Image (cartoon, grey):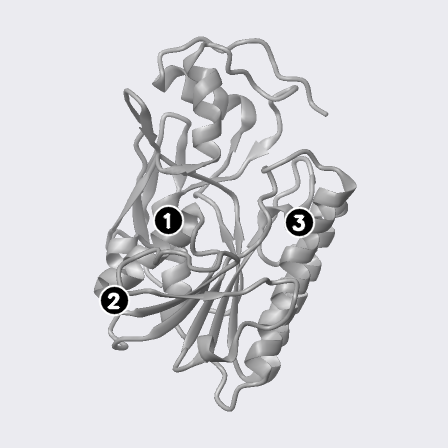
């Protein structure tokens, strides 16, 4: 894969904040400029626009789980724009298409494999489904939902593939940077071992279920996603209100690493994972370089022209 120029920009336009875009570059050494720092760009990133240009394999029929989320909707939009057909799985009966022409099929991930009719003609799977990690207080019941929706859900998805005469040739499955746990100043990449703790255990089990699809001849790509920032929802949307009110602050000491990525870039990675037969295994879905929670907090406050308030206690 070539080198790519990530032109990351931050802007405040009343009620929206956009954080990054990427464009293709032929430079031998690319740089990324943000209000945070100057970073050397890794050669893994590719923009959604470039993925559209490089999609030469013809039309595919793609199954997408988690299609109603922020990432899922964006992926479906670009799949549709480049001519792919979409089958999406949803818990809600009678759900409206996420994009025009997409076909919806009801599936409860913890209850069993997707319906047989949903697999008709499917050549590739993008698997994003999972209970939101930040959606509610982490009671024991909520932690069970977070784990089961991912681990059992993925097991059932692969079981559905196993029952097919011709399974899809590629599975691009979400994971998370929580795989690595809290490792302080240790430098981590895709070759690093899993960490310790609840999220690390969930991610390890989740990935294990995805990799089982390799036994069926599928190429499996695991995208370990960081904090996705977008003006259309997700983590940034939740951060904006307290910051606009002048109440935003770092979390505890602020020294924690904050592995963020823009929505466009995570979509680009997923599309590249679908299209590029050379890619398999884990990919870290994070922006080049990294910032601390304190650096991100100060930059967001500056973009919104608001003060940084007292630290938020860690729990």
Mark 3 secondary-structure assignment: helix
Nearer the N terminus, badge 2 or badge 3?
2
Disc 3: CA contacts within 10 A as few (<14), some (14-19) or many (>=20): many
Residue at the far bottom: name it: 165
Residue at the far front: name it: 94
- The residue sitting at 44% across, 11% down in the picture is 245
CA–CA distance in space, label 1 to label 3: 25 Å
**Mark 3 = which residue?**
146
Mark 2 secondary-structure assignment: helix
Q: Is there CB contact under 8 Å for labels 2 and 1?
A: no
- The residue sitting at 59% across, 38% down in the picture is 135
Looking at the image, residue 282 lies above or below residue 117: above
Q: How many marks?
A: 3
Looking at the image, residue 7 lies above or below residue 149: above
Marks 2, 3: nearer the viewer: 3
- The residue sitting at 25% across, 77% down in the picture is 58
């Amino acid at each position: 894969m070539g080198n790519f120029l990530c032109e990351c920009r931050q802007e405040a336009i009343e009620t929206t904040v956009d954080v990054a875009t990427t464009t293709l570059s032929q430079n031998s050494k690319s740089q990324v400029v943000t209000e945070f720092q100057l970073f050397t760009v890794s050669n893994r990133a590719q923009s959604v626009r470039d993925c559209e240009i490089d999609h030469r394999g013809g039309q595919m029929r793609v199954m997408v789980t988690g299609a109603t989320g922020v990432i899922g909707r964006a992926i479906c939009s670009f799949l549709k724009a480049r001519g792919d057909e979409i089958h999406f799985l949803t818990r809600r009966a009678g759900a409206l298409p996420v994009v025009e022409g997409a076909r919806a099929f009801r599936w409860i991930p913890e209850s069993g494999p997707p319906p047989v009719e949903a697999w008709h003609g499917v050549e590739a799977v993008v698997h994003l489904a999972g209970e939101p990690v930040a959606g509610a207080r982490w009671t024991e019941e909520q932690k069970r939902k977070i784990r089961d929706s991912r681990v059992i859900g993925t097991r059932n998805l692969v079981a559905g593939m196993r029952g097919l005469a011709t399974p899809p040739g590629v599975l691009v499955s979400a994971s998370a940077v929580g795989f690595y746990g809290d490792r302080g100043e240790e430098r981590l990449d895709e070759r690093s071992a899993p960490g310790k703790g609840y999220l690390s255990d969930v991610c390890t089990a989740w990935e294990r279920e995805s990799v089982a699809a390799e036994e069926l001849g599928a190429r499996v790509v695991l995208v370990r996603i960081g904090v996705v920032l977008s003006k259309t929802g997700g983590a940034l949307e939740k951060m904006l209100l307290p910051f606009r009110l002048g109440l935003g602050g770092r979390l505890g000491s602020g020294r924690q690493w904050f592995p963020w990525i823009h929505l466009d870039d995570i979509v680009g990675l997923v599309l590249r994972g679908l299209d590029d037969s050379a890619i398999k295994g884990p990919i870290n879905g994070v922006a080049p370089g990294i910032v601390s929670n304190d650096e991100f907090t100060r930059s967001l406050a500056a973009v919104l022209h608001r003060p940084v308030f007292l630290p938020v206690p860690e729990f």
